[in-house]
Image (cartoon, rainbow, N blue to C red):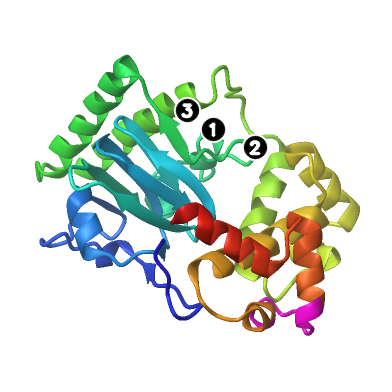
Amino acid sequence: MHCVSSCHLPIFKIKDFEYGSEIKSLDFNLGPLNKLMSTLPYPHRHDCFQIVWVEHGTGYHIIDSVKYDVKPRTLFFMSPGQIHDFVLSQDTTGCSINFSPEFFALQLQNKNALHEIPIYDLKHSVQAVYLDDGQASSVLETLNAIDEEYYSDQIGWQEVIRCHLFILLMKASRVAVPGFDAAPASRNLLLTRRFKTLLEEQFISIQDVSEYARLLRVNERTLNEAVRQSSGFTVAKIIRERVMLEAKRLLLHSEISIAAVAEQLTFEDPAYFSRCFKKHTGRSPIEFRQGLARLLT
């Protein structure tokens, strides 16, 4: 397991992914996995979406405190803000695709198109997809098409890649979420997405349900009902989950004290933070940190 000495983990933008050559676009980047591993420090966050294709190799991949095995023919999916850490064998090969949240929205009439794909929707949010030989062959065909278009320098290469990327996400969704419902998003789901976006921006400073309802210009009952219908949880529970997720990230990927974690998450009393964390996870912050350290060594 890698560790950093402070809670300020690096946040990488597409422009930082040099891979030894000039960046073609600030909204989309493709590069070999071995170059990614050799040029970026781990763990870290991204401000973009990232897809990692592992064609060959072994190891493990930690995404938001969850450990996934790395195997041949695996796809990993990360969203903006997630913390991840790789430990890979020397023979690992594959590629990394990075694209901005605007890559789809700027060109499509439906700005929520990406979040209607099961890989990235609220109910499923898939992180790892393990493929069999046939599925991998189909995915590799699409990845090769993206690679060919990326390096072709033809007019409209981004538009063509956008189509291939959509196909890749749909192929992965069919494997990860068989029989998913592709119906258009309801009003409740659209409101829930707006809430989740706002929560991601404000969860440290705002943890009050009524304040989120005010900012979204709906009443508290409407917001709670929309979120419950879309996700099965209350707004308050999702806020708590997001705060505790950040606590887990800091405990796993930094060496700062429990008191410092509590302070960063605006808990005035470290003891109260510890009680909340134990109620949420069943373990104290110290037990959580020690347990993960044993798991990942």
Q: Do the residues labelled 3 and 1 touch (CB within 8 Å)?
A: yes
Which circle's residue, 3 or 2, is located before the other in the chain? 2
| Residue 166 versus residue 274 in the image, above or below | above
Would residue 20 appear left or right of 157 to someone viewing this image?
left
| Quarter where residue 204 is shown | bottom right
Give SS at disc 3: helix
Which circle's residue, 3 or 1, is located before the other in the chain? 1
Q: Tag on residue 118?
A: 1
Q: Tag on residue 84?
A: none
Q: How crowded is mark 3: few (under 14 residues within 10 Å), some or many (20 or more)?
A: many
Looking at this view, is 71 or 149 the one in front? 71
In percent of width and height, residue 207 lies at 77, 69
Would residue 23 appear left or right of 84 to someone viewing this image?
left
Where does the N terminus fall, quadrant-wise?
bottom left
- Which amino acid does the dot numbered 2 rest on? Lys
In percent of width and height, residue 223 lies at 81, 51
Read off the magenta span.
263-271
Image point (81%, 59%), residue name: 279
The residue pinned by badge 3 equals 173
Image point (55%, 80%), residue name: 256
Image point (50%, 36%), residue name: 119
Q: Are marks 1 and 2 in contact (CB under 8 Å)?
A: yes
In percent of width and height, residue 124 lies at 60, 36
Q: Tag on residue 123?
A: 2
